[in-house]
Amino acid sequence: MLEAVNLTVRLGKKIILDGVSFRAHPGTLTSIVGPNGSGKTTLLRALTGDLPYQGSVRLNGQDIQSLRPWQLASTRAVLPQASALAFPFTVIEVVSLGLHQGSSGQCETVAMAALAKVGLSA
């Protein structure tokens, strides 16, 4: 479960989000809707730890600020609106980045299976 409790985000002196709380349960679809400029992207950036915030964000009961980056990466994925890779990784290498520690012997097999599931094996 992903939970935000009393989340407040400030950009400079301006309060962008003020006291937002919600829960997103596993196996359900949770939508964040609102007009342009209402704080949807700011909320998502705070939930991923890309923006500083007050309050708490918990993933499966653990505060995300107490988790190491590899622990977060093994539990959730973040897909930004736009991104660029700084290194010439292959698709297999990029997909393999999301694998848990200790599964390196099966990286290519697991990555290829994941790509096949979404129709990108070619």
Image: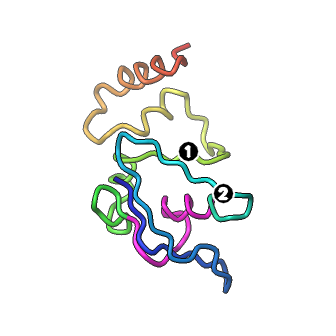
Residue for point 65% across, 45% down: 83
Question: x, y percentage for residue 101?
Answer: 29, 42
Q: Amino acid at mark 2?
A: Gly
Q: Nearer the viewer, residue 8 or 94?
A: 8
Tell me which amino acid carries mark 1. Answer: Leu
Question: Residue at point 45% right, 75% down?
Answer: 6
Q: Residue at x 29, y 55 (%)?
A: 60
- Nearest the viewer among 120 and 46 is 46
Task: Count up the numbered dots.
Answer: 2
Residue 34's disc is 2
Is residue 73 on the magenta stretch? no
Range covered by the magenta-colored residues: 41-57
**Percent of width and height locating residue 89:** 56, 34
10 Å neighbourhood of mark 1: few (<14), some, or many (≥20)? few
Q: Earlier in the sequence, mark 2 or mark 1?
A: 2
The circle on residue 79 is 1
* Residue 64 x %, y %: 37, 64
